[in-house]
Image (cartoon, coloured by chain):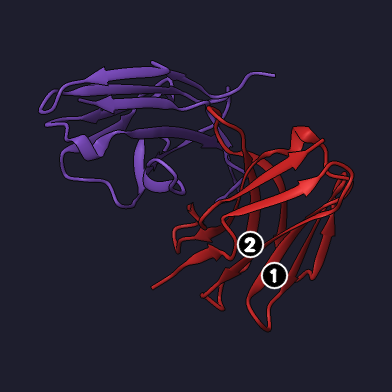
Amino acid sequence: AAGVIQSPRHLIKEKRETATLKCYPIPRHDTVYWYQQGPGQDPQFLISFYEKMQSDKGSIPDRFSAQQFSDYHSELNMSSLELGDSALYFCASSWMTSGSANEQFFGPGTRLTVL
Amino acid sequence: GESVGLHLPTLSVQEGDNSIINCAYSNSASDYFIWYKQESGKGPQFIIDIRSNMDKRQGQRVTVLLNKTVKHLSLQIAATQPGDSAVYFCAENKRMNTGFQKLVFGTGTRLLVSP
């Protein structure tokens, strides 16, 4: 079965650079979530989108932005990178049924290292 | 504030033993919990969920117990196998007024299974 696809899987950047992470949800899923997981930490919710509109916002820094496109894939844009941004970034997708969200399926993550 | 947390950071068991991973939550209004398994380098994988109208739910070799009185839930893994070695997270599937949801993860417990 198709799963959530994230690219790139690994990314190394310098401080103050920018990075773009991509997420391709499971086909027919209309909702995308982004989570950040620091070393030894639990995943923290960043932001989510439903039908290309932002549906919820968590602890996402102002330096980060995200969007969902017409084909439902999503991109997380990160600017002015800081050492503390080094983390695993997970994307999850789900689908809405009768106004209620279903189970989230996670992608393999993108490991971002900021030097 | 809200929190979902685990009591023990690491649990070591022998192959064939039963494992119990505990989790406490603070929000008495929480009504939907999910257990995730995260293997090294991979995204969280759904194991089992439970809603607040249930005290117990069983899956294949796994059982989740929910005690709403003390705001505690546990994941029991029967006949633990080396392949069960991973970090386990409990998460609250927090539903917003909009119908959208976000996952609030607790601190993970690392399960180590020795042959």
Identify the chain of the residue marked 2, using the numbered disc in the image. Answer: B
Tell me if A14 is positioned left or right of B20 in this view: left
Between A115 and A9, the one nearer to me in the picture? A115
Residue B108 picture location, percent across and down = 55, 51
- Asked which secondary structure carries label 2, the reply is strand
A76, above or below B48, in the image:
above
What is the crowding at mark 2: few (fewer than 14 residues within 10 Å), some, or many (at least 20)? some
Q: Residue at x 58, y 22 (%)?
A: A27
Tell me if A108 is positioned left or right of A47 in this view: right
**Which colour represents chain A?**
purple
Of the 4 image quadrants, the one containing the C terminus of chain B is top right
What is the crowding at mark 1: few (fewer than 14 residues within 10 Å), some, or many (at least 20)? some
Tell me if B75 is positioned left or right of A8 in this view: right
Q: Which residue is disc 1 drawn over? A: B52
Q: Specify the chain shown as red.
A: B
Tell me if B87 is positioned left or right of A56 in this view: right
Residue B30 picture location, percent across and down = 57, 70
B97, above or below A104, in the image:
below
- Asked which secondary structure carries label 1, the reply is loop
Report, in whole angstroms, how far the alpha carbon at label 2 lies from the one at label 1.
6 Å
- Between disc 2 and disc 1, whose residue precedes? 2
Residue that extends furthest to the bottom in the rendered view of this protein: B69
Type of amino acid under label 2: Tyr
Q: Residue at x 52, y 58 (%)?
A: B106
Residue A84 picture location, percent across and down = 23, 40
Between A33 and B20, the one nearer to me in the picture? B20
Residue B7 picture location, percent across and down = 59, 65
Of the 4 image quadrants, the one containing the N terminus of chain B is bottom left
Q: Which residue is disc 2 drawn over? A: B32
